[in-house]
Image (cartoon, rainbow, N blue to C red):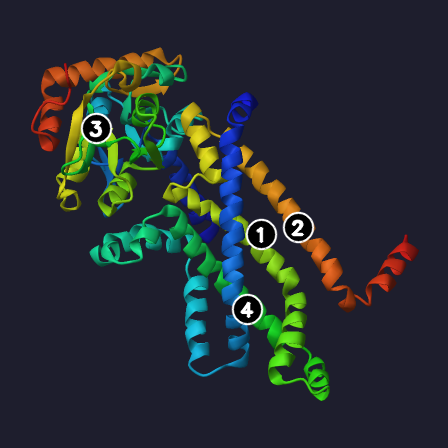
Amino acid sequence: MKPIYGALMLVSFAGSAIAADLNICVEGAYPPFSYTTDSGAVEGFDIEIANALCAEMGKSCEMVKTDWDGIIPALLERKCDAIIASMSITDERKKVIDFSTKYYNTPAKFAAKEGMELSDLEGKTVGVQRGTIHQDFMEGEFSGVELKLYGTQDEAYLDLSAGRVDAIMADSIATLDGFLKTDAGAGFSFFGPNYSIPQYHGVGAGIGVRQGEEDLRNAFSHAIGVIRGTGQYQTINEKYFDFDIFGG
Amino acid sequence: MRVELVLENWQMFAEGVWMTLQLTGLSLLIGFCIALPAGIVRARRVPVLSPIINGYVYLFRGTPLLVQLYLVYYGLSQFEAVRESFAWPVLREAYWCALITFSLNSGAYATEIIRGAVETTPEGELEGARSLGLSPGQVTRLVLIPSALRRALPQYGNEVVFMLHGSVVASIITLQDILGAGRTLNARYYLAYEGFLTAAALYMSITLCLVLVFRGLERKYLAHLDIQAPKAKKMKFALR
């Protein structure tokens, strides 16, 4: 009997692995957009937007947790069918994948111990997440600053609060909710202007799909418009932020 | 496979190789300096000291290197007291955290290797030395240690290779070692394999060099234990 049960279980496992219409790559280490709960589930703004878009498109979706620096390869290797991970739409990335229209757009900002100023930055160490628009921006505009590259944004926060880096450069909302508003962020604040330079920062965060998959891409773009219209987007937005992060 | 991207970024990989060699080499050296006295003490079951060393060895062999590095790098920095202590200028730097962790880790493994070699030293060698009138200190220094280290060579060669491969965890605390360079390449050009394949090739080449070096060392220092070898060779030849 036992081998038969085993075989049945295998079949049901295989079944659940391929049951979803779409596999969505998410990160799970980028609060409040995407974070992993104590029980191991992935939650956050990105995840709720993903679920709303899938429901709107009438597809069942499965979230696949993927490291940030392997997330585009994972899409290309068909480990998932779309990336919903606060990925900015940039020309550099468009050479490799396609994007839906944006689903939010927030500026980038420096953060450090209170009292730091932009003019102090020369010769200091700044932490950024590896393979992000923020790395490109720092390399392009602040060549006199030493960069430290982190696998996740959370690790950069840890080292900022420990004093291993003098400042971090990251998305303003991610920094605000993921760090500055937390206990670890006491005594730290933003400094410098809001940065939103299309050449580096793109035109907001979009949903990444493989090149040539026009139908899927358009379906996502359309669904974004629909949930903006029905108010679903605003409901999710209000759960996380006190202003509309969709941007102008 | 986009080889041209790897070639364009050769400098990044060269720096990565240097970082890996530095970390591995220095931690093996420091680890060895810990392990030589610790291994002998452990073999001799010295009161008070031996249990302490047992505890150290058990701690570092009982937990994965990755966990140790996380605890030292992200763990210690959580405590205000650590951040205000005299040790912070050192613990602040990822490089020193990695070096300290790797050294202690390698030291623990090497302690066990040396303990084994010391314990299996033939009693006759030591007796012979004593009968020549050497003092206990001289016996240890002139006979026990050289004899034990020679016999520890093959196992220690393994430890060197393990340490080289273990050093990849440095890349998770922002150090740009060989794997770090591979990851940066992958992230910059959205590649899946190129960075890792290049890293694998580099680690394999370094391992090959290490294996050759240790083979040479063994041939030189273990020749006296290899009395059987010529016979065995002859037989093989005859069988062909």
In the rendered structure, find residue B36 and report the number of the disc placed on it.
4
The secondary structure type at the circle numbered 4 is: helix
The secondary structure type at the circle numbered 3 is: helix
Q: Are marks 3 and 4 in contact (CB under 8 Å)?
A: no
Q: Residue at x 67, y 76 (%)?
A: B143
- Please state the horizontal and vertical placement of residue B138, each as a whole percent of the image: 63, 80
For label 1, count other residues whose C-alpha is less than 10 Å away and answer few (under 14), some (14-19) or many (20+). some
For label 2, count other residues whose C-alpha is less than 10 Å away and answer few (under 14), some (14-19) or many (20+). some
The residue closer to the viewer here, A231 or B238, is B238
- Please state the horizontal and vertical placement of residue A107, each as a whole percent of the image: 19, 22
Q: Chain of mark 2?
A: B
The residue closer to the viewer here, A146 or B199, is A146
What amino acid is found at the position of numbered circle 1 in the picture?
Val
Give the residue pinned by disc 3: A119
User: Can residue B199 be seen in this snapshot?
Assistant: yes
In the rendered structure, find residue B211 and report the number of the disc placed on it.
2
What amino acid is found at the position of numbered circle 3 in the picture?
Ser
Q: Chain of mark 3?
A: A
In the image, residue A148 sits, relative to residue A51, either above or below, namely below
CA–CA distance between discs 2 and 3? 52 Å
Q: Name the quarter where the C terminus of chain A is drawn.
A: top left
Q: Share a chain, discs 2 and 3? A: no
CA–CA distance between discs 3 and 4? 52 Å
In the image, residue B100 sits, relative to residue A155, either above or below, namely below
User: Can residue A32 be seen in this snapshot?
Assistant: no
**Of callouts 1 and 4, which one flags the residue occurring earlier in the amino acid sequence?**
4
